[in-house]
Image (tube, grey):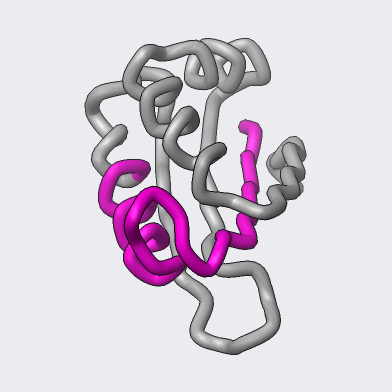
């Protein structure tokens, strides 16, 4: 299993919306990819509640790195990603493997 974690700092104003409005948009649209992108096993988007930190965080799960790559190229994800690039000031990503521990 692969965990894909992305955090964004959003511009205070972008595309006619505040950072908070854009974070809400991101949450709604990214979580709506469940059932649309077959490789996406789980998806959760959190909006930060503490000032001075990143504004939003995505935690998603995939069966493999190949599935993560297919997700990144899926047209529905590309459409959302294109918008996110317009509204962010920075972005960080961490992809890591989850292994069963017995």
Residue 102 in view: no
Residue at the outermost bottom position = 50
Residue drawn at point x = 52 percent, y = 40 percent: 86
Occupied quadrant, residue 4 = top right
Q: Looking at the figure, which quarter contains the N terminus?
A: top right
Left or right of 33? Residue 45 is: right
In the rendered image, residue 19 lying in the magenta stretch gets the answer yes
Left or right of 99? Residue 16 is: left
Occupied quadrant, residue 45 = bottom left
Q: x, y (%) of residue 52?
A: 69, 83
Q: Nearer the viewer, residue 69 or 16?
A: 16
Q: x, y (%) of residue 8?
A: 62, 56
Q: x, y (%) of residue 68?
A: 58, 22
Residue drawn at point x = 56 percent, y = 60 percent: 10
Q: x, y (%) of residue 77?
A: 41, 25
- Figure check: 47 above or below 35: below
Residue drawn at point x = 62 percent, y = 11 percent: 66
Q: Nearer the viewer, residue 19 or 31?
A: 19
Residue 28 in view: yes
Occupied quadrant, residue 44 = bottom left
Which span of residues is magenta-colored? 1-30
Q: Nearer the viewer, residue 45 or 60?
A: 45
- Figure check: 1 above or below 72: below
- Figure check: 74 above or below 59: above
In the rendered image, residue 74 lying in the magenta stretch gets the answer no
Residue drawn at point x = 27 percent, y = 52 percent: 28
Tally of marks: 0
Left or right of 92? Residue 40 is: left
């Amino acid at each position: 299993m692969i965990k894909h974690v992305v955090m964004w700092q959003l511009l205070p104003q972008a595309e006619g919306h505040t950072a908070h409005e854009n974070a809400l948009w991101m949450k709604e649209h990214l979580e709506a990819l469940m059932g649309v992108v077959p490789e996406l096993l789980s998806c959760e988007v959190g909006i930060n509640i503490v000032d001075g930190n990143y504004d939003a965080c995505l935690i998603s799960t995939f069966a493999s790195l190949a599935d993560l790559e297919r997700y990144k190229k899926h047209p529905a994800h590309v459409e959302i990603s294109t918008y996110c690039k317009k509204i962010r000031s920075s972005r960080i990503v961490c992809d890591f493997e989850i292994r069963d521990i017995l």
